[in-house]
Image (spheres, grey):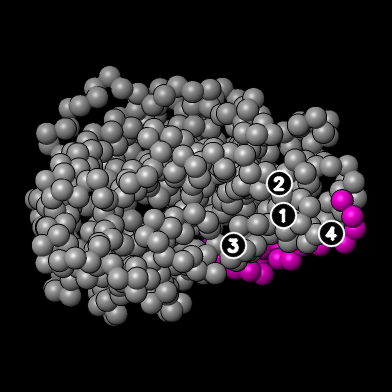
């Protein structure tokens, strides 16, 4: 598994040693007859020393941003195809990305003739600016650096003051519950950090706008699917947290996904839960490629007919698995007397956890359940508590969905037991693993009283838990891996 951004648990080297370089999306798209292109950051630790050992497979053309310069906004280093890497001091990163994107687009249109093309454009903005000091092993994360023309935008904008922003009372569990309330200077620093993220994104918006113009000029706009999304969300001040993305709350995991193209529903929205593992099956579906049997995800409904069917389907996706390993890096600016500096990395910020987000508009539930590596639990009813401030696990005699809390938790824990180790069909249809008879398709059906004894036994006999807080994916630390299977009638 590639479960971190650096060795020993992740990064480009781990991706290569796991044998994945010929088993991922661009390779499959080439096999289906597409010309493939990539511009921007491929992954962490894809760097100036290992970019060619071996080269990333599956691309007709590429311009990769290389570590350790992937988020140095005026000092980026790129490698074009199989050439020697080139450093661009003084040139703005996102402007370079736009220039290289349009060159690749022109090449896809002109040089390759009739084959269709598949192109990934991966800006790093608005990531914190990352530098690597010579006197220490850890990177320093500073506020993102906007282009000069945007540096004075948004002077009066602040982080939205939702209920969970720097709350008066502690929230969460584990180390998050011990965070102090931020003082005025810390809040001001967070606001400026937020403004710099917005300013930095202006160059991305400019690139997107120009990309649509370029597609129109090539007469491709009406025959091209455009997928707009991101790799993670971000928190700034929520739950008293310094800026970061590793803590699994809604700000971190609820991200935009927009798909535009032939046959898509105009201004339509999909109520089923989706996640990154659904992107490859969706792209296969758009390209008319038969889905692979080993896909963990499934095609996202995008046409009006597909959306209508999904919204009526009792077995439609309602779950998203969330998990994280290792340190919860604080991407924080300096400022404030009690505010940590930009190299703040306390060892107790281990943020390893397993969680499940479950949403079903037809039945009305909207929940988040999580088990941390110290075996603290969180469960939130996000219909009544969208800021995730009231952890029902800590409330005596709490009820949820009209049931005692423990009744609901037993079902969510069993579901999480499947999802934390699933592959292929078991990720797509986890209730079938728990109920092989096929008569339970969702949480509502699992909550039927005749299932109570089974789920109580499952929670007591197995239950998602950790033996210790590891810094990466170490299976011996992650408790039971296989659930009990229901062998009665429901």
Query: Residue 486: which disc?
Result: 4
Residue 162 drawn at (x, y percent): 49, 23
Q: Secondary structure at mark 2?
A: loop
Kindly report which numbered mark, 1 or 3, lies closer to the viewer in this rendering.
1
Which circle's residue, 1 or 4, is located before the other in the chain? 1
- On the image, which quarter does residue 158 sit in? top left
Q: Which residue is mark 1?
A: 431
Q: Earlier in the sequence, mark 1 or mark 2?
A: 1
- Residue lying at 32% horizontally and 34% vertically, measured from the top left: 193
Q: Secondary structure at mark 1?
A: helix
Please tell me the numbered disc located at residue 442: 2
Q: Is residue 266 magenta?
A: no
Numbered disc in front, either 3 or 2: 2
Check the image and report above or below for 470 versus 257. Answer: below
Q: Nearer the viewer, residue 449 or 353?
A: 449
Out of 160 and 266, give the one closest to the viewer. 266
Q: Earlier in the sequence, mark 3 or mark 2?
A: 2
Alpha carbons under labels 3 and 2: distance apart: 32 Å
The mark that comes first in sequence, 4 or 3, is 3
Q: Are the residues at dot 1 and dot 2 in contact (C-beta closer than 8 Å)?
A: yes
Q: From the top left corner, tell me how far across and down residue 367 is, in percent.
A: 65, 37
- Extent of the magenta region: 465-490
Dot 1 or dot 3: first in sequence order is 1
Q: Residue at x 42, y 74 (%)?
A: 23
- Dots 4, 3 in contact, CB < 8 A: no
What is the quadrant of residue 331 in the picture?
top left
* Real-space Cα separation, disc 2 to disc 4, in angstroms: 15 Å
Determine if residue 464 is in view: no
Residue denoted by label 3: 470
């Amino acid at each position: 598994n590639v479960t971190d951004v650096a060795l020993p648990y992740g990064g480009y080297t781990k991706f290569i040693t796991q044998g994945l370089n010929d088993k991922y999306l661009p390779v499959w798209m080439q096999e289906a007859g597409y010309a493939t292109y990539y511009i921007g950051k491929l992954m962490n630790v894809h760097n100036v020393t290992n970019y060619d050992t071996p080269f990333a497979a599956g691309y007709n053309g590429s311009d990769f941003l290389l570590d350790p310069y992937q988020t140095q906004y005026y000092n980026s280093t790129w490698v074009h195809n199989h050439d020697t890497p080139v450093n661009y001091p003084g040139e703005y990163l996102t402007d370079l990305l736009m220039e290289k994107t349009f060159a690749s687009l022109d090449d896809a249109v002109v040089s390759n003739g009739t084959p269709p093309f598949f192109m990934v454009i991966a800006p790093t903005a608005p990531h914190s600016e990352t530098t690597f000091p010579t006197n220490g092993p850890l990177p320093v994360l500073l506020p993102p650096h906007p282009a000069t023309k945007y540096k004075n935008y948004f002077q009066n904008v602040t982080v939205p003051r939702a209920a969970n922003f720097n709350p008066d009372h502690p929230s969460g569990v584990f180390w998050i519950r011990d965070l102090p309330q931020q003082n005025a200077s810390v809040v001001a620093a967070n606001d400026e950090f937020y403004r710099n993220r917005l300013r930095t994104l202006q160059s991305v918006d400019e690139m997107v706008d120009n990309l649509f113009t370029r597609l129109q000029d090539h007469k491709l706009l009406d025959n091209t699917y455009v997928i707009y999304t991101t790799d993670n969300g971000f928190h700034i001040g929520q739950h008293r947290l310094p800026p970061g993305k590793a803590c699994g709350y809604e700000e971190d995991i609820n991200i935009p996904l927009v798909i535009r193209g032939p046959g898509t529903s105009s201004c339509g929205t999909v109520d089923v839960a989706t996640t990154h593992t659904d992107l490859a099956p969706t792209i296969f579906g758009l390209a008319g490629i038969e889905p692979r049997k080993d896909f963990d995800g499934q095609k996202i409904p995008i046409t009006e007919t597909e959306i209508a069917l999904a919204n009526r389907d009792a077995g439609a996706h309602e779950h998203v698995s969330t998990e994280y390993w290792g340190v919860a890096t604080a991407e924080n600016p300096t400022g404030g007397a009690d505010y940590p500096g930009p190299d703040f990395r306390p060892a107790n910020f281990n943020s390893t956890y397993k969680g499940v987000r479950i949403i079903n508009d037809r039945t009305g539930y909207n929940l988040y359940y999580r088990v941390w590596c110290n075996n603290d639990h969180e469960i939130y009813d996000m219909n009544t508590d969208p800021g995730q401030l009231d952890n029902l696990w800590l409330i005596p005699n709490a009820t949820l969905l009209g049931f005692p809390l423990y009744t609901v938790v037993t079902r969510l824990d069993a579901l999480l037991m499947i999802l934390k180790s699933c592959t292929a069909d078991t990720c797509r249809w986890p209730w079938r693993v728990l109920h092989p008879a096929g008569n339970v398709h969702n949480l509502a059906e699992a909550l039927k009283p005749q299932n109570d004894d089974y789920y109580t036994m499952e929670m007591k006999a197995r239950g998602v838990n950790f033996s210790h807080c590891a810094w990466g994916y170490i299976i011996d630390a992650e408790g039971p891996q296989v659930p009990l299977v229901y062998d009665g009638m429901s």
